Amino acid sequence: MAYVIGDPIAHSMSPLLHNTGFSTLKIDARMKRMKVTKQELPKVLDKFKKNGTLGASVTTPLKEELVELVDEITPRAAAIGAINCLQFKDGLAIGHNTDAEGYWLTISREEVTLQGVTTKIGAIEPDSQKMILLGTGGAARAIGNGLAHHGITPLFVSRTPSEEQYSWDEIAKVVPQSIGVIDCTSLGLSPETENDYPVALEEIVCRIPHGGFAGSLIYHRESAWCRAAEQCGNNLTINNGKWMLFHQALLAFEIWTGKKAPSNAMAFSLFR
């Protein structure tokens, strides 16, 4: 058995993806959603280890909590400070992070047209461009790690910024210097929270350079962020969270099963 854990969790499409993969390869496993709070996490993790759980995908708000709870952690997950993929082996819980490379695989093929020149993001000259990341949670740090690994400088925006980060009040200054902005917050998960951004979304997306990139991690509904990006009339390349979900899931599937994920079948289940 495999699980996807977090809170909220009802929106997760991870079971659709992984169950398609298990079925296609005739692997005797299923994935289920499980609502887990931070307080419940230690007991749930212990239960998974004892029950021979195959693996677990991890979403908000548990990614950072797991770092101190697992028995082993990969160097990349430790560097990021967040775990989105749990592997169980010989009674041990091993923490991985597949978000970093999963998001890079998502956007590296996307094109931006800056100053009249069209380039795939993955082909941008290393260290020559910056990407703004809204938020500093586990997902933001993973994406920032992936970008930096491939030569794009991540600039983080936080409500409580450190010396190296920017406040929301500074967005007007930093966004025009970038190739785009990725909303890594969880505010778009629900209509009840998507109006809680500290700055009007139009003030952000309409400052992205013409032809730049606007990314979101929300895949189960059209978010206010993506709507604002579409309406600003700036010819932006817009990417929601479905492809990130897909790519990080392929990597997790291979960690759990030791088999190459059936990407065509899994993609068809998600995008049909």
Image: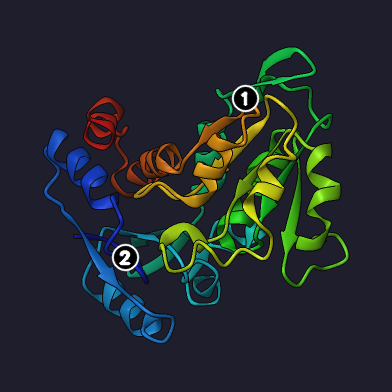
Identify the residue at horizontal 66%, vertical 29% (top origin): 234
Q: Name the residue nearer the viewer: 66 or 108.
A: 108
From what the image shows, is residue 211 above or below residue 15?
Answer: above
Give the residue type that dot 1 points to. Answer: Asn
Residue identifier under label 1: 235
From what the image shows, is residue 133 above or below residue 68?
Answer: above
Task: Judge from the rendering whether residue 234 lies leftward or rightward of residue 262; answer left or right.
Answer: right
Question: What whole-number distance in Å separates the C-alpha atoms at marks 2 and 1?
Answer: 33 Å
Residue identifier under label 2: 9
Within 10 Å of the Cα at label 1, are there few (<14), some (14-19), or many (20+) other Cα atoms? Answer: some
Identify the residue at horizontal 66%, vertical 56% (top origin): 200
Mark 2 or mark 1: whose residue is earlier in sequence: 2
The percent coordinates of residue 139 (x first, y second) are: 56, 56
Give the residue type that dot 2 points to. Answer: Ile
State whether residue 167 appears in this view. no
Which label number is shown at residue 212?
none
The percent coordinates of residue 247 (x first, y second) are: 42, 37
State whether residue 71 appears in this view. yes
Q: Name the residue nearer the viewer: 95 or 37.
A: 37
Within 10 Å of the Cα at label 2, are there few (<14), some (14-19), or many (20+) other Cα atoms? Answer: some
Helix, strand or loop under label 1: loop
* Camera-side mark, 2 or 1: 1
Q: Name the residue nearer the viewer: 30 or 197.
A: 197
Occupied quadrant, residue 25: top left
